[in-house]
Each structure stands twice: as C-alpha cells, then as structure tokens.
Amino acid sequence: MISRIYITGKVQDSREEIYLKSWRQSGFLVSGVKIVDSYLLEHSLSTSELTTIAGALTNPTLENFSINKIPQTPFKYLIEIGFKPGVTDNVGHTAKETITDLLHLKQNTKLVVYTSKVFLISGKIKIEDVKHIAASLHNPLIETSFVEDEKKVKNNLPLKIPQVILKKLKPVIPVSLNVDDEELINIGKEGIIDETGVRRGPLALDLLSMQAIQSYFKKLNRAPNDIELESLAQTWSEHCKHTIFANPIDDIKDGLYKTYIKGATNLIRKQKGKNDFCVSVFSDNAGGIVFDKDYLITHKVETHNSPSALDPFGGAITGIGGVNRDAIGFGLGAKPVVNTYGFCFGYPDDKRKFFRDKNLTQEMLSSRRIIDGVVKGINVGGNCSGIPTISGFLKFDDRFRGKPLVFAGTVGLIPIKIKNRLSHEKKALSGDYVVMVGGRVGLDGIHGATFSSVKIDSSSPATAVQIGDPITQKKLSDAIVKEARDLGLYNSITDNGAGGLSSSVAEMAKECGGVKVYLDKVPLKYPGLRPWEIWISESQERMTLSVPKKNWKKFKTIMESRGVEATAIGEFTDSGKCVVAYKGKKIMDMELEFLHNGLPKRHLITEAIVRSYENPKTPKNFTKTFEELLSRNNVAGSLFVSEQYDHEVQASSVLKPLSGAGRINTEAQVFKPVLTSNKGVVLATGICPSYSDINTYHMAACALDTAIRNAVTAGAKLSHLAILDNFCWCSSYDKTRLAELLASLRACYDYAVGYGTPFISGKDSMFNDFSGYDERGNAVKISIPPTLLISAIGVMPDLNKTVSPEFKKSGDIIYLLGDTNDELGGSEYYRLLAEKEGTNNIGNNVPKINLEKNLKTYKKVEQLIEKELLNSSISVTLGGLGIALVKASVGGMLGCNISLKNISGNAETAEAKLFSESQGRILVSVSPRNTGAFEKLLGDVAFSRLGKVSSDKKFIITDKEKLINTDVKALYKIYHSFSNKMK
Amino acid sequence: MKNVKLKIKKPKVIVLAGYGLNCEEETKFAFDSAGGDADIVHINDLISNPKMLSKYQILAFPGGFSYGDDTGSGKAYANKFKNHLAKELREFLSGDTLAIGICNGFQILTNLGILPGALTYNSGGKYLDRWVDLEVKAKSPWLTGIKKISFPIAHGEGRYIANSKEYKDLKSNNQIAFSYIKGEVCGFQGLEANPNGSDYDIAGVMAYNGRVLGLMPHPERAMFSHQNPMWYKDKKVKPEGAGLQIFKNAVKYFRK
C-alpha cells in the first residue's frame, strides 16, 4: 500500500517569510506560502498504525498532521520538490528508523519512506512564475519538481513511488582491445561501449595508458573485463596518481613532487634533527605532526571543485565529509577536531549564463546559486558532525565562474600510542577480512575520480554527483575513533573516497601484497548494480578496514550496537594479486604491480611565458576609491559565512573566525584540541591567485609567506609550524601552464626550506577549465587563474599568549613591521582600477619575498608575543596597509590617526604606501609604556611608527596631505556591507 | 528510599550519546571539572540495560544534531527514548535527581514532554553561532548565585514558542530559567539581545521544581575565560569561564 502523511506547521515559520520576501523581490505576485513536509510510505500497515506514526512525526506544539489529505490551507498553486530515484533521502531514512522502532517492526518488514517538500502558494501569480520558483527550489540533477494548479489537485498528491529500477544488463562484459589506436583513444576518452551501444563515460585514460593496458592483456592472452578497465582508470586517474606531479618534467627526472615538495620536507627534517616534529608525512590520508608528548595532530585539505560546479550543496557537503574521513583514515583513526574551508567563486552578481551543450539545454547554475549551495554544504556537513569550522576564506574572480574551487580541510587528533602501538603505523595482514563499514553502495559518484581529471562539458556524468549523509558518517566516526580503535580491533583503515572500493581496497592490499573481494557481499542501496559499478562507486560515508578474523565478531557487534553497518567483503592475501569475484566467478584478476605501477611515464615539457601589463590610471577621489576597495567581495568581511558555521563546538575556541567588538574576520585561528592542555593549535592560510597572471613564482611565494605570516601574527612558532599545499591549475597539458606550475613549485621549495616549514600533505586538481557555450551559442572556455592554497598548522606552547588582530585601547602606539615597497602589480587596488577603466591594466610589480628580512621579522614577532608586548597584531594582506588599518580599527571599534610620511621601504606615492601588497608586513599596536622595550627588542628589523589608536572613532590617514578622513562607524558599515547583502 | 536526600560527594552523571549528539565530551569534561563523576553512555547501551539509569543522580542530554534534525530537531531521538525508556525516565525524575538538556538536548526534552513549549526555526532562517547574554530571575538548584551570565549559542532551531497564556503560566510557576537580554557581550559587539526570535526572549525553561533545566545556549562552551569574545580586551581574569557555575551548582546540590 502507498500512503502519504503531511506535516504542516501551525506557528509562524521564518523559512516561509524568507521565501516570500525573495520571491516578491523577484517580482512574483505571491501573497502567501505554506511549507508542508510530505512522507510518502510504501508499507503494509493498518490505518491506526499510520495514525500512530503520524503522531510521532508531529510536534503537537508546532505542527498538525493529515493522512492522504492535503492540509486545508487555501492556495493557488502547489510545488512539490522531491528526490530523484536513488538519491540519498536522509529524512526518509530517519523516518523509517523512527517508524521501525516505534512499531517494533521486523527488519524485513516492507517499508520505504520517501520525503518531499510541498509549497502551497497563493496570490495572483501566474503559472510561468511558479515554474520559475520551482526551478529555483531544486537542482534537476538530483531532485524532481512537480507544479500543479489547485483546481487539479484533488485531496491528495500522486501516490507514485520514486523507486530505482535498473535495466537488466549483463553483469560483466569483456572489452576487446584488439582495436586500432583511434578506438583505443575513444575508449579512453568516452568510455567502454555498453551492450546497449552507449559509451559509459570517461575513463580519462590517454593513448599511452591504453596501449600499456593493451599489451598487458595481450601477454595474459585474454581481453580485459569491463571491471578491470574501470579499475585501472580509477587507479591511474590524475586524481589518484597525480601524474603531472609524478612524471619527469624538462630535465627534472624525479618530477615536481619528489623534487620540490618531498625534497623540501626531507631537507628540512634533516636540518631540524632531533627537533623534527613530523611523524607521518605524504604516506597516509593526512599529514601528522607532534602536538605534545601524548598526541599527534593531523591535517589534510582537499578540493571538491567539479562536483560543486554541478551540485554545489552536494559537492561541498561530500567534500567536507570526505576530508573528515581522511582524518578518520589517518593511522588507526584520528578524531576530527576542526574543519577548514576555502571558496573561490565567480562574483555573486555575475549574471552571465553558460551552458554545457551547444543546444543550450544544460545550463550551468548561476554564480549566486553555486555560492549559496556551497556555503550551505559546508554548514550542514560540519555542523551536523559536531566539528567546529573555524578557519576559512572567500575569494572572487570572474574566472572562477566556470569552475568554483571548494577547499575543505580537517584537523585530526590522535594519541601517539594506542594499546602500546604507534598509532600512525598500520598494516593489513594476509588473512584479515576486508571490511566495509558505513553507508551502502548505489550509483552515486560513478566516475568521480576520472571526472575530476577532465574539464566540465556536456558529457559530464550526472551520476558523478554524490549526496552526503552526515549522520551516517557521524555514527561511523564515533564508533571507530571513540570505541573500536582503542580496543585494537583492526590492523588498518582507510577512507573510501575517489574510486570507491577499487581504490581503498587495492591501496590497502599493497600493505600485505594481495586481496580477494566478493562483490556480491557488498550491501547495496537498491538492486541491479553491476559489479563494475559496485567496485568504483563513490557512495559516501564508507571506510575500509582490515580486521583479523578473531576480532570480527566483536567488531561487528560494536558496529551494530552503534547503528553502523559493517560487512566482511573479502580477505587480504599475499598472492600479489587483486582478485575480484562476483557470484562465484572470477571477474578481475590482475597483478598489484601492474595495477599500481603499470602506468607509463610521460615526459612533460614546459615552455616559458612572460606576461606584461600596463599600470592603471590613478584615481582623483582617494577616499571614495578607498571605500570602494573596502567594499569589494575580496576585501570585505564574510561574517555571513562564519556565523552560520558552528565554531564553538568541542569547546575549543581560542581565536575565533570573528574577533573583537566589530567582529572582523581573523586571518589566523587558534584552538585547544585537548581540554586539559594549554597548548594551542594555530591555523592560517595564504592564497594569491591574483598574482599568477603576472608571475606564478611570486604568486606561490606570496601564498606561502602569507600563510606563515598570518600564523606567526597570532602566536605560532616557526620552529613548530608545518604547511600543506593545494594546487589548483588549469589546462595542465599546455606547456606554458606547465612552465607556470614549475615556477610555482620552485618557489614552494625555496621558501619552505627558507622558513624551515615542512610540507606534510598536499593535493592537486589540475583541470579547472570549463568548456561550453554562452547564451548565444558561442563556444567559450573559462580557465581559472593558477591557484595555490598554502595552509599552515602549528603548535603554540601557551594559548594564553594568543594575540588577536583588532586594536584594544586608545592611546596604544601603532607600528608597522617590514618594508612597504612599490609592489602594486596584481593588487586588489589595481584590480579595482582596471575593472573601472575596463582594461586589464594590473601592472607588473608583483610583491616579492625578501626571505632574510621576513624571517628576521617573524622571529622577532615570536619574541614580542612571548614577552606579551603586543596588544594587537594583524598581517598586512590583500588591500595593503590601508585595509589592514581598517580591519584593526573596525575590529576594535576604535579610531586611529596615522602618518605615512616616514614609512620604511621604497614606496613613494600615497597609493603605493596605502595599497601595495608587499609581503612580510605586520601591523601591531603596543601599549605606550612598552614602546621602549618593543623598539629595543626589534633592533635592526625594519619598522615604522605610524600613529596612535584613538577613542574618538575618527579614522585619519595622512601622508604629505590628508588622504583619508572618515570614521570607524562608516567603515564598519562598508566592511560588513557585502555580508549583509549575502545574508 | 528515593525521597530521602543523601549527601553525595561525587554525584554520578550520565551524559547521553549516539545518533549525532556531539557535545558529550565537553559536557562530561564540564561535570568532571565541577567535581562530578560523569559517564558518556550511548543510548543503545542504556536501552539494553535500562536499570543503569537508577545509578545516576544527574541526567544530561548534551547538544548535537541527533538524527541530523531530520523530521524535526530532537524529535527522532526523543521518540527512540520514549519507545524504550519511558518508565525508567519517569522513575528517575520521581527521585531527587537533576536533569539538563542543552541545545539539541533541550529540543529532545521538549519533544519528550518533560519541558514545556517547543523550539523551531530561527527567525533569521539560518543556523547561527554567536554569544548571548542571559538573565536569571527564577530559582533552581542549577542556577544558584547566577543573575546575569553570557554563553554562546549555535543552532538553527532555537526559537522558543509560547503563547501569552503559556508565558503567564511559565512565569508564575517559576519556570523561565533564562531570558535573552542586552548585556555585556551584546553591548560589546553591538548585537541584538534575542538571537532567534524566541517568544518573550525565552532562552531556557525548567520543570520539576527547577530540577530539570533546558536551555539553547551552551554553558559547556564557556568553561574557560578565553572562550569569551571579550577576553582579548582584558586577559588578566581568572582562567575559569562563567559557564562552569551551572555544573558546579548541580554537583553542590548533592553535597549539601
């Protein structure tokens, strides 16, 4: 039987008011809306049981229910938004669990719950407008919408179940590779031809790789099965193998990663000797460093760009969920203690429309919808999991309109020893069960790994979208890191991320030298999946473990008692092979050696490129330009994001994402991962895509310097500071882009070694290009500016010494540490001027790092903080000194009177002094009684005494003449204007 | 003999966990720091051994996102609790015991029907993390010595619903534990007193003569002075945060 339960609110509903407001702003004639929750049940229950259920799903103070009867509210049109068949329906799962528990139903009782939201809309609105609203309420990749006139709606909505029905196809097909190169290319690019004659979607294997596979199977004297090819495609994908970083390039034999990233870390660790704090770097799901004598902290930052372009909410939530699992999959399992994020978006008011196909039927989501969806995805992912989201940033550029960058990071905490065993070491043993825990497997996320290795176009698969279920993951996470781990029940653990089981199982098999998997044992969301789909599906919230047979029963019992599904799906072996069986037949049988190391090397060649730009014209009205700069999306505060992310859970906050009376965004954050310890962990980031148009060496150097400077500014110690790299590049097979990549890697090496800050983990995403069509059907390609995110993580011995960025007291003396040089090239200020003139005149004088000077400054800042001589300190970043002064003032809601006359450095013009983004600078305020000690300690470090903090709220900057004359309240308004618009 | 009050030096606290509750560790830490003896217990372990509840003097439903707020915040967890532990809960509350629900825990307690009223979507429509100032007028073992206090909130469904009659009843029955006011932190950061549109500015309510407390703000996130946004203005304060007082009061109740 099929029935519907409707739950309708009876108190004022703020969601309804917010929808109404936004629809009216769009000009729709709506007078009211009622949101109704619909539960569509397929069941064999009695009427009285249905009533009991409806009662349990209703909070009588807030809601009413009705069964098979739309609530008696007058309306004109109705919109129902539901899920497409097979899409994870979290509310449906919870409702089913509640019902099963309430009625004490047996596990095999027929009961499926599908949920949807029904909007009852009234007013003089026309049906076309209702359809517009419906389109804004759902994402057609994962959701359905149903619009109906009130007159046509009888008492009830259709009782039709969105069940997944899969075509019955042959489970396994052999793929002949006895074909010419052209067909090999086609298979690699567009996929295996199914028995229906349709290609399955990209394997992202190039001719060279296809030929290697061809000759491997020739030696075996058989054709590969589809699952074998799909498996190779996953394992060899750019996403998993990082071929651009691994292959030789120019005369660099060992490739970029080994030479510059690992090379830097190895050298630094050697130089540090017994002070080396690295414990596990590059080899695990996250990097791990020492926190104190009892604990390690881990960090990992991932990107989820391609999925977020198609389904922003789903892409972001699975991004953060995925990187949480990197913490859980570190060593024997670290507890996630902090989430971080970073978003690079197109501008929210960008109204350009883009399409994936030439017929203009597949429209890319608008910039604003991408922003809203991504922001919400990290919100739900982090908040629901009880992990504080404390550190993050937003960046905007027109060129992120084609593909947004969505960075998601997780810091983990793990005891150094668990049951007398070093927690960062793990090894699956031959004879252990291969155990999958967590969610079930569906068609979601098929070809995710290969998809992210190519650009977005009309063949981008919809099934590449994954849906997150944070509670399933939370249950899994708690059961592992809070219980099973400390009982020593398993030998190894890893995340099921890109490539699904095919990656996690084959990776883990390396530890013991073989594996055999029985795919028919894998629990499925719905029947009908073919083995290759089960093997590579990226359905979320799953981990793979190796559990000794003697522990299996106990392990399974614990998991079950926590509501977590655990299934033994095979056994680790020492056969040297990865063997997969399905319904009694061997369908994959490959040597691990070929699977992991068979990918042919390609020699990459670079071709240098020099770009050059004019300077923009200097504006007349200085104060106005100053205010415009402050209001820019890249400069203004992003409170609307920070305050919707729980940053206080786990009771660990020290320096929060928002600080001071004026709640400015901090550029470093501090938290207390162990409640009984006063040690703090400092987090900071640096990202400067704007400079890469001019020079990627300096872009990377500045990103690294900024991350380190931000961290030191809050209280981090260079001696206990590590960094992570996330490269997001575009058109990475283009030789000039490779040259730019190589330059940025050189900078990474130079400055990481220079500052003695080792890389501990990293990730790259090399094809952030969009190829599609504009509204008129013209082909367009949008490539992101080459972007490097550097994330810093450090330990400070006493969190009580943390310094926040805002001014504290009137009368305090304001100093600038470091030199201000004429380095406006690529600055936010020049970007603003260039945009206003409609040119690309962004200058050439990009900021350059003076390592020796900066290092000296940062070490002095450490001492100043140690001696508690700083009342505030803020790193000078985007927008230069002018903007740093605004932030410190607005943060403290205190004025300042500043003179730029004697500023140290070669900047001469007022605009260079105010807006140059010269690196290595920190703006501090010092109590008047401490200035002597302060200046003495600084010694020969470059510094400038700029002026005083004032209580009159006036904000005055003078050079030869008065440049800026305004007040803090006005600046506060401008600083928060972007955020207020986005709320 | 349930109703005879015994002096207990280290009252035992059961802090519930499971299905997405997520503040159990810091809540346990708060009770332990205050001198209690807290255990984190998964609801399924309590269900399989319901008698366990009678060992405890204090019952805590911590904050979190039980069942991801699916079907309504606190609803699914409360349903599960009711289905299996209704009798034990009744017995527990009939003794001289204390109970607290913080944030999601408060939502669970209202759904269980132990506390009056209900909580729904914030008036701003979004999840909100900020600090609030609170005023205490009523008496309760939990609130001894507290008049004004500041904690953070972090919730999407924290708007307390009560009509005028219910409000009158709450007031006259000494049931309003906390009201949002414009105090120190709101003044400092220029924030509105009421963060979520709660009726009559209600932030927390009580029942059972003040023995059962539910509140949206998080006292366990104000255990250290450095957590308060005003700390950076003057770090020379005692390291203990104001929130610990709530937990100390609960422990002290059993020592008297």
Image (tube, coloured by chain):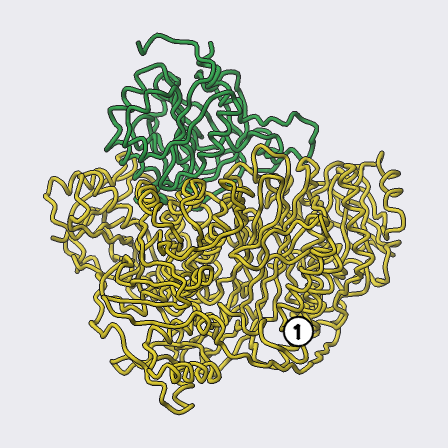
User: Looking at the picture, does residue B241 appear above or below residue A928?
Assistant: above
**Residue A89 in view here:** yes
Left or right placement of residue A605 versus residue A499 in this view: right
Label 1 Cα neighbours within 10 Å, binned few <14 / some 14-19 / many ≥20: many
Q: What chain is the yellow one?
A: A
Residue A203: quadrant of the picture: bottom left
Outermost residue toward the top? B4
Q: Write down the residue under mark 1.
A: A742
Residue A925: quadrant of the picture: top right
x, y (%) of residue A215?
A: 42, 84
**Residue B106 in view here:** no
Number of callouts in the render? 1
Left or right placement of residue B186 versus residue A252 in this view: left
Chain designation of label 1: A
- Taking the spot 49% from the left edge, 52% from the top edge, the residue there is A426
Query: Which of A251 and B29 lies nearest the eye of the viewer?
Result: A251
Left or right placement of residue A93 versus residue A382 in this view: left
Query: Which of A186 and A65 lies nearest the eye of the viewer?
Result: A186
Q: What chain is the green one?
A: B
Residue A413: quadrant of the picture: top right
Left or right placement of residue A327 versus residue A701 in this view: left
x, y (%) of residue B35?
A: 51, 20
Query: Which of A308 and B129 lies nearest the eye of the viewer?
Result: A308
Outermost residue toward the left? A46
- Taking the spot 28% from the left edge, 28% from the top edge, the residue there is B49
x, y (%) of residue A576?
A: 42, 67
Q: SS class of the residue under badge 1?
A: helix
Amino acid beneath label 1: Leu
- Taking the spot 51% from the left edge, 62% from the top edge, the residue there is A303
x, y (%) of residue A283?
A: 55, 59
Query: Which of A459 and A517 lies nearest the eye of the viewer?
Result: A517
User: Looking at the picture, does residue A737 appear above or below residue A926?
Assistant: below
